[in-house]
Amino acid sequence: MFQYRLKAVVLAGGRGERLKPITDCMPKSMVRIVGKPVIDYVLEGLSKLPLDEIIVVLSHKKLAKYVEEKWGRTLSITIVYQKGKGIDAAILSAKDLIRSPNFVLAYGDIVVNPKAYIRTLETHINSGAEASMLLSPKLDVESYGVAYISENKIVSISEKPVPEKAESTLAVAGIFVLPSTFLNYVEEHGFTEALNMLAKEYTVVPSFWEDWWVDIGYPWDILKANEYVLRDLRFSHISSKATISSKAVIEGPLIIDDEAEISHYAVIKGPAYIGKNSFIGDHCLIREYTSVEENVIVGAFSEVKHSSIQPNVTVSSYNYIGDTVIGESSVLGPHTVTLNILPSGVKVSRLHPVRVKGKLLTKLGAIIGCNVYIGANSTLFAGSIIKSHEKIKPHSIIMQQRSTL
């Protein structure tokens, strides 16, 4: 065991460009997953380790305020504002505060069971190696850093390799135990090359993680993270402060948070999450893997499935919302419909087809930014992207998509 307590560095300064338009009005690490910002999942995992201090590198005052208020009393947190752009600048912003021989490094945009943090540190201790890193098998190697293994040692790292040329499917999963000398390598050569130099000069061991793990890189990763977190629910957690009509139908497992209200004849089919101060109207249907965050209104006769509704959103009556992400403070007028079956042949990074009644279908609804207003009787085609602050006229048909999803 270490003769000293470790420090940890959390990299939470990224702007989340690939997550736009969801991140137009909030930092990437503040995106909600089943009632909690992504940063909470990271800090909860690190709280399981024997840490002396957690240094959170960020670039947004809103995130800094949240971390200090939520975690400042229970963890030894130091806030550092990132100087410069990119992962190299983020790590080096904390360099002067790391004085121990080893430190834990964690990405601020991953959602995984806290046991992954424990396993990475245990692997490091039990192996006696100079460094260790968590690896997770993934099919979409082109969107991750990939590690190559020989004789149970990491020998090299390749950043976002071409799938046809990649000889590994082990994604670098964003949790490391590293020697402090690594920081010098980053300063001289950059992050990925620093990892490669570390693998050449030291013993770097893999910590394999076979369970689910999500890097929140694209908007649809939010849906996958919600699904995994909700799938792990074993029991329902219904707040005594929630108001649930005796005529509502509740099928667990699910979470209904404080001050939530479920109105007459609403049906909630878990696993699902209904956030604080949210309202589910008469005859609504909330289906599996939906996360309705705090202060959300879902109007009467609306159906929501496998979607993420971020805080302060209003979904009016008679809506159908499927496989969709809605950014904070947006309003969807009555009779809005999101189509959610992508055309055959459309490929989306990290999104894979599912079999429905013998057919393989790729499901993705709309990605709606923050402070959007969508007029009544509008239809959003599968894969539609609605920019933040857009005002959509009633009876609109939206087909706009990113050139590449």
Image (cartoon, rainbow, N blue to C red):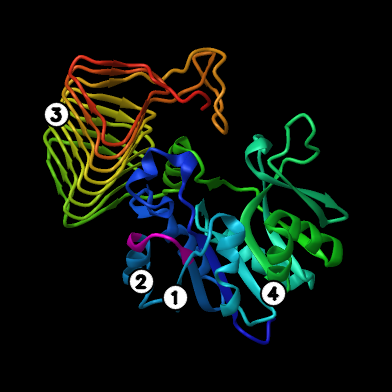
Task: Determine the secondary structure under disc 1.
Answer: strand
**Is residue 59 on the magenta stretch?**
yes
Residue sitting farthest toward the bottom: 3
| Closest to the observer, 197 or 53 | 197
Q: Picture coordinates of residue 249 (x, y %)?
A: 21, 35
Q: Nearer the viewer, mark 1 or mark 4?
A: 4
Marks 4 and 2 in Cβ contact (< 8 Å): no
Disc 1 crowd, CA 10 A, few/some/many (<14, 14-19, 20+): some
Q: Which residues are magenta?
A: 57-62
What residue sits right under mark 2 in the picture?
68
Q: Picture coordinates of residue 387 (x, y %)?
A: 34, 32
What residue sits right under mark 3 in the picture?
300
Looking at the image, is mark 3 or mark 2 earlier in the sequence? 2
Q: In this picture, is 15 found above or below 188?
A: above
Disc 3 crowd, CA 10 A, few/some/many (<14, 14-19, 20+): many
What residue sits right under mark 1 in the picture?
77
| Amino acid residing under circle 1 | Ile
Marks 1 and 4 in Cβ contact (< 8 Å): no
| Amino acid residing under circle 2 | Glu
What residue sits right under mark 4 in the picture?
180
Q: Residue at x 75, y 56 (%)?
A: 193
- The answer to which image quadrant residue 89 occupies is bottom right
